[in-house]
Image (cartoon, grey):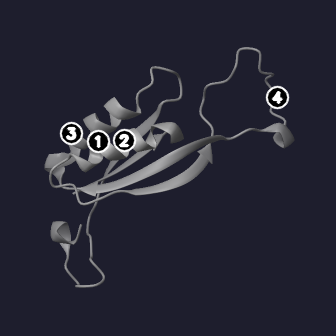
Amino acid sequence: MKMIIAFVKPHKLADVTVALHEVEGLSGATMSDVRGFGRGRAKTAPDKVYYDTLDYVPRVRLEIACPDELVEEVLAVIEANAHTGLRGDGKIYVTPIDEAVRISTGERGEVAV
């Protein structure tokens, strides 16, 4: 099992979500509104950062637990539907999941996802 964590622009969330609904065998996704910053800065930005004027960029964080065989399809769906061609389209990370437990039934492993 893998955990896919994606950061996308808020206005692309609906496109990504609708496309994820088409992935056969995907059990769901969790979304959170988050803010952050990347390494991109304007060429005219001063070298010194003034903390009272620091501006954070809004993004949506998607978390998707899925079987290994769905990872490439889910990545392709997110990448295709979150893409605008502009800087700051987002990032996707994939990490292993050691265990999953469905609290209501006690099921463990992939059946719990």
Of the residues tagged 3 and 2, which is closer to the observer? Answer: 2
Asked whether the beta carbons under mark 2 and mark 1 sit within 8 Å of each other, the answer is: yes
* Dot 4 crowding, Cα within 10 Å, few <14, some 14–19, many 20+: few
Q: Which residue is mark 4?
A: 48
Marks 2 & 4, CB-CB < 8 Å contact: no
Place of residue 15 in the rendered image (x, y in percent of width and height, measured from the top left): 38, 39
Q: Residue at x 48, y 30 (%)?
A: 89
Q: Give the distance between the C-alpha atoms of the residues marked 3 and 4, in whole angstroms.
A: 41 Å
Relative to 18, say whether 79 is above or below: above
Please give the name of the residue rendered at 20% of the width and 47% of the height, measured from the top-left corner. Answer: 23
Residue ranking furthest to the top? 43
Q: In the rendering, which numbered label is found on residue 19? A: 1
> What's the residue type where badge 4 is placed?
Lys
Question: Upstream in the sequence, badge 3 or badge 1?
Answer: 1
- Mark 1 or 4: in front is 1
Of the two numbered discs 2 and 4 on the same chain, state the one appearing first in sequence: 2
* Residue 39 picture quarter: top right
